[in-house]
Amino acid sequence: METTRVLFCRLFLVLYLLQMVTPSSEQFMVKGIKGPILAPFGGEVELSCQLSPPQSAQHMEIRWFRNRYTQPIYLYKAGKDLYGETTSRYVERTELLKDAIGEGKVTLKIFNVSVDDDGQYHCFFRDGDFSEEDVTEVKVTATSSDIQIFVHPPNTKGLIMECHSGGWFPQPQMDWRDSRGDILLPTSKSHSQDGDKLFNMKMTLLLRDAHSGNVACYLRNPLTGQEERTSIVLADELFSQKKIWIIIIITLATVLISSILFFSFVLSPKSKVCCSWNSPLLVGSVIIISSVIVDVILSVYLYQHQRVPDSDPLFALDAIWAEDMIVALWVLMVFITMLISLIYFKMRGGNCGQMVMAEGDSHRDARPNLGPEAIELADPID
């Protein structure tokens, strides 16, 4: 019985000593930087992680990886840097700073940051059969001060402006604002990405009415809050396009009215036969009114008939096409109306002249035929 107790005590002592020598499963923890960490595009970023409690990590395996454990972006093992196992995209772009590795702290430095470096990074430590890791998130940012505003030629539908800017990440917030800082609703927004996956932004604005002061294009990085803008001052002369077209149409209408009135009074003889409801003034007025009504209806249809939406890049071209068609329509209608009026009143003048001559001949034929006796009777008595 006593021998059993001795054996049991020895076994207990051995197990206790083994527990003191063998590392426990809670030997250390890994603490990384609580992100996200902002990394400037084209610059450098440092990711640090620390063992807790602090202890030397020179003999441990230290691995940094993104999504897959088997594809490290940096590997330190058995006191050596194993560059041959580094993922090709990070070759010669990473460095492990080991100045404080005796205290369990290492720092991964990434050079020439690209958009593809955006995401999560795992810091992994292994000591024998025990391992721990922590995750740090990196956010790549890029801003640009290159902002350009283009103003299209004004048309009757308004003034179209475009704002362009490239070299942003992530996709920035983009707004039009007036001189008071109020947001102007854009006609359209679009974006694309270049070979470096940076965002190129485009935004359009249609000002239908005169706008005093300046208009600014704002872009803001949602991560850093950095804001860039450029503005342009709009002159009132840019909004005089509608007045110009009104003047053109009034001029063409004046030419039409003057020419028809001229034809009606000059080419038609002033005769009583050609008066009343068939008078040249009344006929000319009907021709003028009919032509103007047709021109106005067709012009309004072309102006209101929007073949492409405001957000379409061809909207400005469509507006110019509509203006050209309206002017061509008015010129054509004026020419055709003048030609028809000329032919009509010329033929009318000829017919009226023949009617007047015929009426004169009929009056002469209706006079009594006086013979010699009647003439003698008409002589005075001496």
Image (cartoon, rainbow, N blue to C red):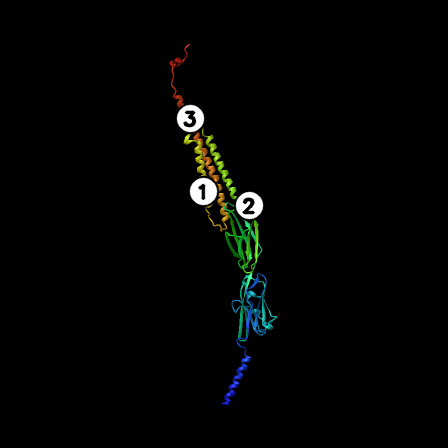
Residue 351 seen: no
Query: Looking at the image, which residue is at 46% across and 35% down?
Result: 339
Q: Amino acid at mark 3?
A: Val
Query: Looking at the image, which residue is at 53% across and 73% down?
Result: 131
Above or below 64: residue 356? above
In this figure, which residue is indicated by the disc labeled 3?
Answer: 356
Above or below 312: residue 126? below
Quarter of the image where the C terminus is located? top left
Precedes in sequence: disc 2 or disc 3: 2
In this figure, which residue is indicated by the disc labeled 1?
Answer: 298
Percent of width and height locating residue 152: 53, 48
In this figure, which residue is indicated by the disc labeled 2?
Answer: 236
Q: Amino acid at mark 2?
A: Asp
Q: SS of the residue at dot 2?
A: helix
Query: Looking at the image, which residue is at 48% across and 40% down?
Result: 330
Q: Which mark is residue 311?
A: none
Percent of width and height locating residue 129: 53, 75
Percent of width and height locating residue 167: 56, 57
- Crowding near the residue tagged with mark 2, few <14, some 14–19, many ≥20 C-alpha atoms within 10 Å: few
Query: Looking at the image, which residue is at 48% across and 45% down?
Result: 322
Separation of marks 2 and 1 at Cα, in angstroms: 29 Å
Precedes in sequence: disc 1 or disc 3: 1
Percent of width and height locating residue 366: 38, 21
Question: Seen from this angle, which residue lies furthest top?
Answer: 382
Callouts 2 and 1 close, C-beta under 8 Å? no
